[in-house]
Image (cartoon, rainbow, N blue to C red):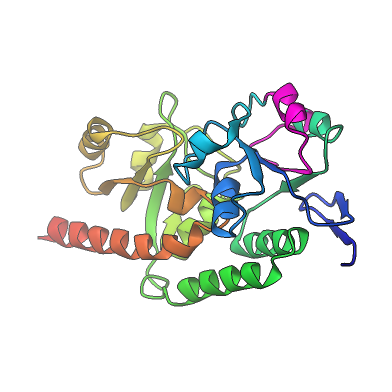
């Protein structure tokens, strides 16, 4: 077959004479994507945060976390390729790993970026038809979700507390919030800004979403925020539909639909 020659999402060249046979994934959502693409036998190592699929935790070598990667452990596995992410993995880690194997670094801010990632992996692993079908299925799920596109709700989405932290407009989470029908109050900010809750009260949010990751918000956090913002609908939400790129968007829009129905009911109750 012809050589595989492309660039990753940072513009770094990736060249193979044949499809890689041993993969290390340093990103939980990328690990799940590899599973959906049917690359079970090829994946040799994952991080301790790679929770899907569950059975891979016992079958694959754990190579540390996304930030504290065990370089020597990866070197011992002799991988053909390492899959990393600009946000999850540092430049220093990527640079060290490039001495071991080619490193494909993803950089995802939109679903278009995600479609390109899936297409690239299809080319790299010689599974282009499988990748194309996954992209088609995600696009179909996205196009089928239209009910809440015209009535965006003023929303604050929290990922951390002490300090309270939200998401800016240059993030994949913000992109998914918009697609889901939410108007991110902090879309004019960058990355993950800290938020003063008193200042947020002046912005009068309609919806406050408390994510399950990276900080696992609990019922007590929801009650605390609801007391501070009695007019808003405060909900605990699954983080993956908003944060996981790769294959997870395939199921994200069904989740958004059920979430919006919850919020509609909440808004109606507050009006009454």
Magenta-tinted stretch: 70-92
Can you tell which quarter of the image residue 202 is in?
A: top left
Queried whether the magenta region covers residue 87, the answer comes back as: yes
Residue at the location (79% across, 53% down)? 8
Measured as percent of width and height from the top left, residue 49 is found at 52, 34
Q: Is residue 209 visible?
A: yes
Q: Nearer the viewer, residue 73 or 104?
A: 73
Residue at the location (45% across, 48% down)? 240
Residue at the location (61% across, 43% down)? 190
Measured as percent of width and height from the top left, residue 43 is found at 64, 45
Instruction: Residue lying at the far left in this picture: please name it.
Output: 272
Q: Is residue 121 left or right of residue 59?
A: right
Residue at the location (84% across, 55% down)? 7
Q: Nearer the viewer, residue 92 or 16?
A: 16
As drawn, 96 above or below 170: above
Can you tell which quarter of the image residue 88 is in?
A: top right
Q: Is residue 187 visible?
A: no
Measured as percent of width and height from the top left, residue 158 is found at 42, 40
Quadrant in the picture for the C terminus:
bottom left
Q: Is residue 172 left or right of residue 252?
A: right
């Amino acid at each position: 077959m012809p050589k595989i020659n492309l660039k990753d999402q940072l513009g770094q060249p990736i060249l193979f004479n044949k499809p890689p046979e041993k993969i290390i994934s340093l990103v939980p959502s990328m690990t799940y994507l590899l599973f959906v693409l049917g690359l079970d036998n090829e994946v040799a190592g994952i991080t301790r945060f790679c929770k899907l699929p569950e059975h891979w935790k016992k079958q694959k070598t754990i190579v540390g976390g996304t930030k504290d990667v065990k370089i020597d452990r990866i070197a011992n596995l002799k991988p053909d390729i390492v899959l990393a992410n600009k946000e999850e993995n540092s430049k220093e880690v990527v640079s060290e790993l490039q001495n071991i194997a080619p490193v494909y670094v993803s950089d995802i801010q939109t679903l278009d970026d995600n479609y390109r990632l899936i297409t690239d992996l299809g080319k790299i692993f010689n599974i282009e038809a499988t990748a194309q079908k996954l992209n088609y299925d995600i696009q179909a799920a996205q196009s089928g979700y239209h009910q809440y596109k015209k009535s965006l709700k003023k929303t604050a989405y929290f990922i951390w507390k002490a300090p309270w932290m939200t998401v800016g407009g240059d993030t994949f989470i913000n992109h998914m919030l918009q697609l889901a029908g939410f108007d991110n109050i902090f879309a004019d900010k960058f990355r993950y800004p800290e938020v003063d809750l008193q200042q947020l009260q002046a912005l009068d949010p309609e919806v406050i979403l408390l994510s399950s990751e990276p900080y696992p918000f609990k019922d007590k956090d929801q009650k605390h925020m609801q007391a501070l913002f009695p007019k808003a609908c405060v909900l605990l939400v699954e983080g993956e539909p908003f944060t996981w790129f790769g294959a997870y968007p395939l199921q994200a829009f069904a989740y958004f639909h059920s979430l919006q129905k919850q919020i509609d009911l909440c808004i109606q109750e507050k009006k009454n």
